[in-house]
Each structure stands twice: as C-alpha cells, then as structure tokens.
Amino acid sequence: MRHSYQEDSTGDSPLLKVEFEVGRTLILQPKQVVRGTVVLIIPERSRSLWVSGVKIRFRGEEIASVKSKDAETGTMRRANVARTIYFERNYVVWPSALESQPRANEYRPWSELNSGIYRFDFALKLPAVNFPPSIEGPKGFSIRYIWQPIIEGSGGPLVEGPEVVTLFIPISFAPPAEEWIFRDTLYYDNKPQKKMNSLIEVEAVLPKHVFSPGEEIKISLSLTNRSNGRITRVQISLRKHYEGPLDTEFVCEKHERALVSSDKRCDIGTTGGRITGNLEFFLSIPPKFYQVPPTFEGRHLRVYYTLRCVIQSEMGRLFTKMQYHEVTIPIAIAPYAHIPHDKISELNFPSHEESQLSPFFFDPREDFPPDDKETQNKNGALSYDSILNLPLNNYVNEDYSSEDRSSGFT
C-alpha cells in the first residue's frame, strides 16, 4: 500500500476508483498480464473509515433482455433478463496482499483509515483462452468484462466504486481469401413461381467470405433485367444484426442497423439488347472493434452481418411507378485478417467452452505469475506482442477509453 495526502482533495465522501498501468486504453486478450491500482481518496473533512478490507472484483458476463409492458402503468420496461457469468474473481488488495486472502470460514477484523490518498496495486493474468468478444449492442444486449473496486466494512460492502468496462478481443482469424459468387433470382411478388415470371437475376462476386475491421469490401454486381421496367438505382449497405435472448422460453428481439452504405444510379432496361448491367461497389468496414464486434453466437445473444442490396426499378412510361426489390448477402466479420498458420502456431487458443481455465490474480510485486510457462516464446513463431503491431490490426490500440460505456448501436 502507498499512502499520501494532498491538500486539494475535495468533497466529503470517499472516492474509490481503478487505474490501469497502461491508462484508459486497456484492451484484454488471451495470455495478457494486467496491472493496475485501486485508488481510495478519503477527504480531510470526511469521517474515518472502519475497513475490514479493500478488494478488486473482475467478472465477465453476457446479458440479453426483452421489453414487456407493465400491466398497471402501460409503460415498457426491461424484463426477462437472461444472464450468464463466465467468471468472477475477487482479490483483497488491503491488508497485505500476501496475508489478506481470507479463508472461506473466517471473519475479518477491521481497521481505521484516516483521511488521505491510498493506492493498492494488483495484478491479474488472463489464461490462454478465447473468451467471448466484448459486445455493446442496443440497450439490454451486451458482453462485458467489468472491474469494480469495493471497500468492505463490518457489515459487508461499505463503498462500491464505479464499474469499469474493458474490451476483450479474442485472437481468431479469417480463413484464406477465396472468391465466391452469390446468385439469386427475384420473382414477381417475391414468390418463386415459373421461370417466365422472374423479374431480376442477381449475381454478386465477393473476394472472400470473412472480413475484419478496417478492411474494404469489394462487390462486383451483375443484374439481368427480366421485368417490363428499367432498373435505375442500386444501393448496398453493410448491416449489423443483434438477436436475443436466444432462450426458447423468452421472446426473441431483433435489432438491425446500417454501418456503411453506397448507391449508384444506372439504366438497365429491357429494350435495345441492354438487359444486363455490371456495377462495382466498395464499402469500408469501420476500423474500431467496439463498433464492429466479430460474428458471434453466445448463450443468450447473437451478432451477425449481412450485405443488403436494394434495387429500384421504374415501371410504366406515361405514369411511372417505383418498385423496390431486396437481396440479402451473408458475410462474416473476424477480429483479425488471415495470417498463415506457421506464423501464429502459438496463438491457437481454445474457446471458453473448451477450457476450464479462468483469470487469476497474483502478487503484484512479482514480474510474472507463479509457475507461468507462457511468459517466454522460445520458437520462431509470432509472439503475442508482435500480433498487436500487425498493419491491419493497429485499430486495436487506438481511440478506446475504458471509461466510455456508450453503445456502438446508435
């Protein structure tokens, strides 16, 4: 414990917070060591605190909920909350980190803490496990990794500090790029009747199946017009979808929003022999992970992506009537672009469902956790530190603050 007092301490209530060694941009990944400090400020005008312990809590949780109408007031409220806690770890940082970890059947005495600024260090090791990715969806949908400092007194929690949410990015990669073709035929009233009733034949060529944040999606679109009108405009948008709770006893909510879009005007008619038109679209995936979490299905929520193609056609000559047709193309988002396996042989981590390992705290005075065999990378494979500096993955370390808990779903 480090203790000091500063004259500029303000207010009458104690202040409790968490500070990380790397600052507010902490991002979690497998095999990572996290170091930080629990800061307790007791103002001079405040009463002394009778404290039995100061601890830091770290947990990972998945939440999905649905809205229901209150029968009495008629207002909508969040209900039917489905929640899973992946892990929850508590560590006593005061008294002494070596002597303070209590036995399960043992009460703890308390001591007086006078006004001043107290700093209690902690250290945590994440196992070589891919936990679910952090997700901030619409209200009621999230996967979060949360830190919270707590002061305990004689009767339980005395002061609970604010929760700090940090991103967790699993280390998983897209497969090798392989061009593929999506085909679909639009029929009158969207009913696949006879071939002669088809309106538009759609063919889209994409360079690969799985993309990563910050990459560009190129779509080569070919439209064959079988209708009596002209195709005059095409719009393509990258869309993010949330679904949950997935539990069968709850009503599943679905949310959708556009991330980026592009549109082009064209003139693909049915006369003059020009019934087929070719268009190219380029969509840039947002580079920030918290805006574009990877495709994932958990216990209670699902996040996935599609490309929505909206085709506008004009019917009639004297009195023009607009018609709109929609095609949905599936794609997936991975945390990282493809990297050859021989360069990442030590970064093949199991999922949390395949491993029983959990994060654990250790003595912050030690450089490494006890009996840690993963601190050295002795072969020529790409090290953990190196992967964070790959050209396509620099977005990981930029412009993210652990104090920002706003949803990426806006």
Image (cartoon, helix red, strand yellow):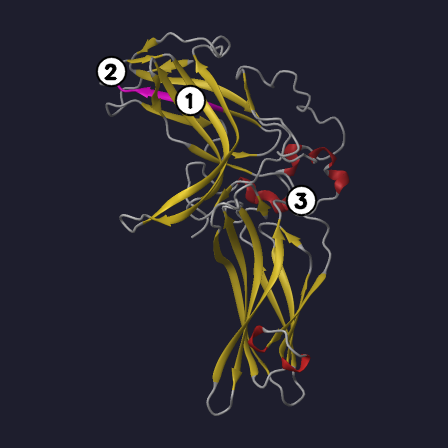
Which residue is painted at 66% across and 23% down in the image?
375
Does dot 3 land on a helix, a strand or a loop?
loop
The question of residue 39 being in magenta is answered with yes
Tell me which residue sits at (57%, 55%) in the image.
305
Q: Mark 3 or mark 2: name the one nearer the start of the chain.
A: 2
State the image coordinates of residue 383 (x, y, percent, origin top left).
68, 32
Residue 224, how many percent across, how many down? 65, 78
Question: Viewed as shown, does residue 349 lie left or right of 92?
Answer: right
Determine which residue is flagged by label 1: 38
Q: Amino acid at mark 2?
A: Arg
Query: In the rendering, at what x and y percent does residue 149 appear?
Result: 41, 24
Q: Which residue is mark 2?
A: 47
What residue sits 42% from the left and 27% below the top? 148
- Which of the marked residues, 3 or 1, is nearer the chain's N terminus? 1
Q: Is residue 361 above or below residue 379?
A: above
**Residue 41 on image: x %, y %:** 33, 21
